Image (cartoon, rainbow, N blue to C red):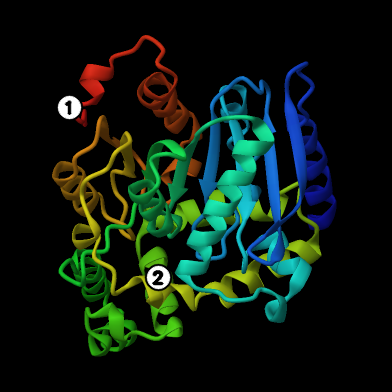
Amino acid sequence: MLLTYRALRRRALAKTLRITTPHGIDESSFVPIGGIDQWVSVRGEDRSNPVILEIHGGPGASNLIHIPRTRAWERHFTIVRWDMRGAGKTFSAHGPSGQGELTLSRLYADALELTDHIRARLGVPKVLLLANSFGTVTGLRLARDHPERYSAYVGTDQNIIAGGRDSSAYDALLTRLRRSGRRKPLSRLTALGPDRTTWSPEEWSRYAKTVVTTDPLTYDTMKTVVVRSLWFSPLHTLRDLRAYLKGMTFSEQLGPQAMPLDEYAEGTAFDLPVFLFQGADDVLTPPAPARRFHDALTAPVKDFALIPDASHFASFRHPDHFLDLLLTRVRPVVTGEAGSVGAVGHGRR
């Protein structure tokens, strides 16, 4: 019965994904990037709309599973979704031994190569960069370094890694564990200490999973949004689902690589608009560090917003609210359409 219901649900979702507009685009294929073929999806109802390049999180968590939830976005934007090396269909196609170098610098170079491919393929001078969760580690670097390629940067579930100076998420986790009487994970994480630069990939992953499972809102979002999207995705077979999860485990090695970074030392000056939209109750990437970074950065336009009733995965828990932010705050800036750009520049809450 479970598999029958899954099949019926997938079939219904597949119908909602059909793009039949005269000027629409729906292309999916492997593209040679960084020496290996990587899966790229391009979807939108009107090719004249602004182009978004998504940088997914995880690490290793492809955003393709969320296409049914974010279908409405495609009426207003052409969205490029990319399964990075180590993730999704790219991982499935090549297996662990065929992913090549898996480092943050390699993903950064891959993203630039894909950006130029998309600019040429769609005939646009710049694309809007949208990064979520762990993808914001790479996204922020791309935005800082290459304003000639990107019209603006939108970060959600934004990581702000400050050279180990901020331990607020770690401290909050210990408090939740003490209150709930969970002595074993409390002892284990206390022994680890807040210095994430010393953690192994396994320890980094265990910490993240503990954060998710000890916060009711985050855990509910994981079950009702992420797991449900994965299970019912019309774009993924059961074999794809197994590969998806294996890819996430394989990609855990990227986590500790990001921990020595310091966003403030790398620079708070941006030559393109910067938007940070954070879940108001995010316990994995708390809004306070993102807000402080927003306040410290300089950019032609900058804006910050909290998404209520949202922890991590805020854009996927409330895709309509997130789309409203894109349409009212971001799109007027990148298209030059009439809008309250002056108000945006002051960083509305």
**Residue corresponding to mark 1:** 346
Report which quarter residue 265 is drawn in: bottom left
Circle 1 SS class: loop
Give the residue type at disc 1: His
Of the 4 image quadrants, the one containing the C terminus is: top left
Q: Is residue 13 visible?
A: no
Circle 2 SS class: helix
Of the 4 image quadrants, the one containing the N terminus is: bottom right
Q: Which percent across, then down, holds residue 308?
A: 32, 37
Nearer the observer: mark 2 or 1; the answer is 1
Instruction: Say which of 315 and 186 sits in front.
Output: 315
Instruction: Say which of 230 and 79 sits in front.
Output: 79
Q: CA distance from mark 2 to mark 1?
A: 33 Å
Q: Vertically, is 326 above or below 154?
A: above
**Residue corresponding to mark 2:** 208
Give the residue type at disc 2: Ala
Q: Residue at x 28, y 18 (%)?
A: 341
Report which quarter residue 347 is drawn in: top left
In the picture, the disc for residue 263 is none
Q: Vertically, is 257 above or below 310?
A: below
Extreme-top residue of the structure: 338
Q: Which percent across, then down, holds residue 112?
A: 52, 52
Disc 1 crowd rating (10 Å Cα; few below 14, some 14-19, many 20+) is few
Q: Residue at x 73, y 18 (%)?
A: 23
For this view, does 67 lie left or right of residue 10? Answer: left
Total label count? Answer: 2
Q: Vertically, is 336 above or below 203?
A: above
Instruction: Say which of 252 and 121 sits in front.
Output: 121
Disc 2 crowd rating (10 Å Cα; few below 14, some 14-19, many 20+) is some
